[in-house]
Amino acid sequence: MKKIIAVIMALACIVCVFASCGKKDDTPKELTSGDYTYVVLEDGTVKITKYNGTSDEIERDLPSEIDGKTVTVIGKEAFAGAEGLTVVNFPTGLVKIEERAFAESSIKKAFMYRSKSLKEIGAEAFSKCPNLVQVDMSSSLETVGEKAFFYCTKLKVATFRGNTPNIADFAFDACPSLVIYTKEGMDKVIAYAEKSLIELKYLTV
């Protein structure tokens, strides 16, 4: 009987080993190119997962491609706490900025208008950026997440043009000097500004 039990246990161990070997690791491998750590997504595009740049003050054009692959996502906390960022120009093929991507960084101006595919700015993506003064949104933008620009106390200008995105609660909370610039007819932006008691001005062009 003991021999039978031992044989059964041995067979069970062998099955477990083969089952483990057959499992595929679906975690994307992190790679590094220049100032950026990234992963390749299932669709063959790139998500930037970490910024490795210096603390020297610099205007930064985020890459539209890394190693020949289109950059579509700025990952969670990829630039969080980064020093030295001043003006950041976002690439044309960008689709999403994930939560807390630039939180508590030194960024001063965020120009997203070149990004013709940007759909979403995640929750707290630019929260608590003490130097941020200007944000120019993409015309393709559909969603601004909760507290996306929370407690950016120096933020003076946020410009919306093109699509009229959904703006989550507290997206621009604690931005006492903010003026939102938009076009007439962008009802969701206008309603958000009025509800949040944010000064609103209309673009003439």
Image: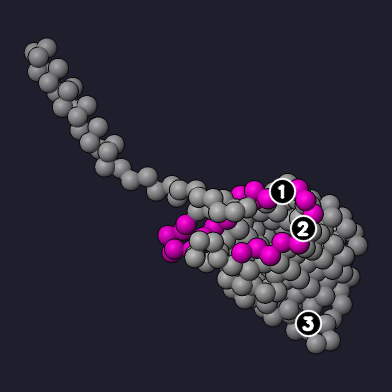
Residue positioned 50% across, 48% down in the render: 30
Q: Nearer the viewer, residue 205 or 194?
A: 205
> Going from the N terminus, do you reach mark 3 or mark 2 first?
2
Image mark for residue 58 = 2
Q: In the figure, 79 relative to 141: above or below?
A: above
**Amino acid under disc 2:** Ile
Label 3 and label 1: CA atoms lie apart by 38 Å
- Specify few, some or many for label 1: CA neighbours under 10 Å numbering under 14, 14-19, or 20 or more: few
Secondary structure beneath disc 2? strand
Amino acid on which the number 3 mark rests in the picture: Lys
**Dot in front, 3 or 2:** 2
For the N terminus, give its image quadrant. top left
Residue segment shown in magenta: 40-63
Q: Is residue 104 left or right of residue 31?
A: right
- Circles 3 and 2: CB atoms closer than 8 Å: no
The amino acid type of the residue labelled 1 equals Thr
**Splitting the image into 4 quarters, where does residue 57 fall?**
bottom right
* Mark positioned earlier in the residue sequence (3 or 1): 1
Q: In this rendering, would 122 be left or right of 202? A: left
Disc on res. 54: 1
- Read off the residue under disc 3: 183
Can you give x and y, in whole percent of width and height, for residue 196 in the image? 83, 64
Label 3 element class: loop
Give the residue at x 59% y 54%: 34
Q: Which circle marks residue 25 in the picture?
A: none
How many numbered marks are there?
Answer: 3
Residue 55 magenta: yes
Q: Is residue 76 magenta?
A: no
